[in-house]
């Protein structure tokens, strides 16, 4: 069987986990944006000044908030107490999520393999996920299945790589992160220090176990000719390769879903709309330059995701939301719908057996 519906117990657990994770993630972002760093007094020319200090890798960046006075003393007192309260809250929320992890594993909703889990967490922590970096390719199916409340078969999900779509258009705030210096390769090495570029100037990173991460971007010259090809300044950073057709995905609607890592802990996954994914996969499967061995899998994933979009998610393929997609893709909709119905018929839905 290729498709199994979640049980009521799995659904209840996922709802609770998502709610708890949303609260934790909001608090974590508040901490990172407002309370990362320290406030301390520094002597200068016989006077004390209040400085806020943050760290970017090995660099220490300090900014004066003014000479010591009742006003600056209150600033420090308020900042310190608010920071301590938020850290305490984050600790309690993290404890709750860790307490849910064994249940998530027992219910077998911990679907995302460990390496993908750690990469997604790192990208989210650095503020890239959902803003400039989106998951495309097979890994996106982990998000689509939970959006629909079903589970795909492991055969449809199996992969040894991760494709990351880089939308360079939003300006990235790098004030308190180390992304600018180390780039994507630096983030990957925080996950696994064996990651290295496949070659100098490559779009691909690989680790000692043969896991691959590709950084890809649109190739349209009107949008990309002035854009940098890499996120960081490091000479070792990945250079995003331009691929025809990816501008369609950059302009497509985006979705975000909470998924569960193999360790039982929740993570965020940002990807393109499932209808855009299905249409693009079908289009890719018809390209002459696509490897023959990959075409059947592309076609199967297109049909499976389209099936979820039409049935469980009730997302129409003639929606104005997809107007950014070119006619070349949208004209595949009638055929894709037939493929989706055939796939669902061949893979009758069961209920997951715990």
Image (cartoon, rainbow, N blue to C red):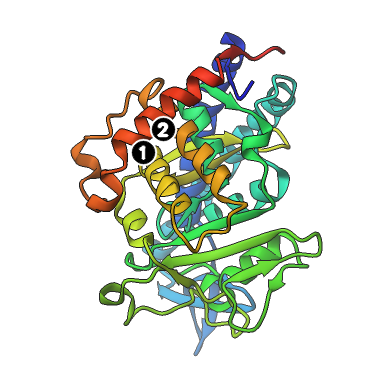
Is 306 drawn above or below residue 206 in the view shown? above
Q: Position of residue 76 (x, y in %)?
A: 47, 59
Which corner quadrant holds the C terminus?
A: top right
Q: Position of residue 5 (x, y in %)?
A: 56, 16
State if disc 2 and disc 1 touch (CB < 8 Å): yes
Which comes sooner in the sequence, label 1 or label 2?
1
Looking at the image, which residue is at 72% across and 68% down? 195
- Among the 4 quarters of the image, the one containing residue 243: bottom left
Looking at the image, which residue is at 55% across and 78% down? 181
| Mark 2 burial class by Cα count in 10 Å: few <14, some 14-19, many 20+ | many
- Among the 4 quarters of the image, the one containing residue 287: bottom left
Looking at the image, which residue is at 53% across and 50% down? 137
Residue 60 vs residue 114, the one in the foreground: 114
| Mark 1 burial class by Cα count in 10 Å: few <14, some 14-19, many 20+ | many
Residue 215 vs residue 153, the one in the foreground: 153
Specify the label residue 120 is tagged with: none
Residue 244 vs residue 56, the one in the foreground: 244
Specify the label residue 275 is tagged with: 1
| Residue 173 as seen in the image, left or right of residue 293 | left
Tell me the residue that label 2 is attached to.
306
Which corner quadrant holds the N terminus?
A: top right
Q: Is residue 265 visible?
A: no
Is 311 drawn above or below residue 209 in the view shown? above
């Amino acid at each position: 069987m290729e498709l199994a519906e979640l049980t009521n117990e799995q659904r209840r657990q996922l709802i609770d986990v998502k709610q708890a994770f949303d609260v934790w993630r909001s608090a974590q972002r508040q901490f990172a944006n407002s309370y990362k760093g320290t406030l301390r007094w520094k002597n200068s020319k016989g006077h004390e000044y209040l400085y806020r200090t943050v760290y970017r890798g090995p660099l220490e960046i300090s900014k004066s908030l003014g000479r010591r006075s009742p006003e600056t003393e209150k600033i420090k007192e308020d900042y310190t107490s608010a920071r301590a309260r938020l850290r305490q809250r984050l600790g309690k929320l993290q404890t709750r999520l860790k307490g849910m992890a064994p249940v998530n594993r027992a219910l077998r909703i911990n679907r995302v393999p460990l390496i993908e889990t750690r990469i997604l967490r790192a990208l989210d922590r650095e503020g890239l996920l959902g803003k400039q970096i989106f998951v495309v390719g097979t890994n996106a199916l982990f998000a689509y299945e939970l959006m629909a409340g079903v589970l795909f078969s492991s055969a449809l999900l199996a992969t040894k790589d991760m494709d990351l779509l880089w939308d360079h258009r939003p300006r990235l705030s790098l004030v308190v992160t180390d992304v600018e210096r180390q780039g994507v390769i630096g983030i990957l090495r925080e996950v696994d220090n064996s990651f290295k570029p496949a070659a100098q100037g490559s779009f691909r990173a690989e680790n000692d176990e043969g896991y691959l991460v590709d950084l890809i971007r649109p190739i349209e010259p009107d949008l990309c000719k002035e854009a940098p090809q890499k996120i960081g300044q490091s000479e070792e950073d990945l250079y995003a390769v331009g691929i025809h057709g990816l501008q369609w995905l950059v302009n497509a609607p985006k979705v975000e879903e909470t998924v569960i890592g193999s360790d039982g802990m929740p993570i965020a996954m940002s990807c393109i709309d499932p209808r855009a994914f299905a249409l693009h996969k079908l289009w890719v499967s018809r390209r002459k330059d696509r490897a023959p061995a990959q075409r059947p899998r592309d076609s199967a994933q297109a049909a499976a995701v389209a099936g979820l979009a039409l049935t469980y998610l009730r997302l129409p393929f003639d929606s104005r939301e997809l107007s950014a997609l070119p006619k070349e893709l949208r004209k595949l909709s009638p055929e894709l719908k037939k493929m989706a119905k055939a796939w669902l018929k061949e893979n009758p839905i069961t209920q997951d057996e715990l």
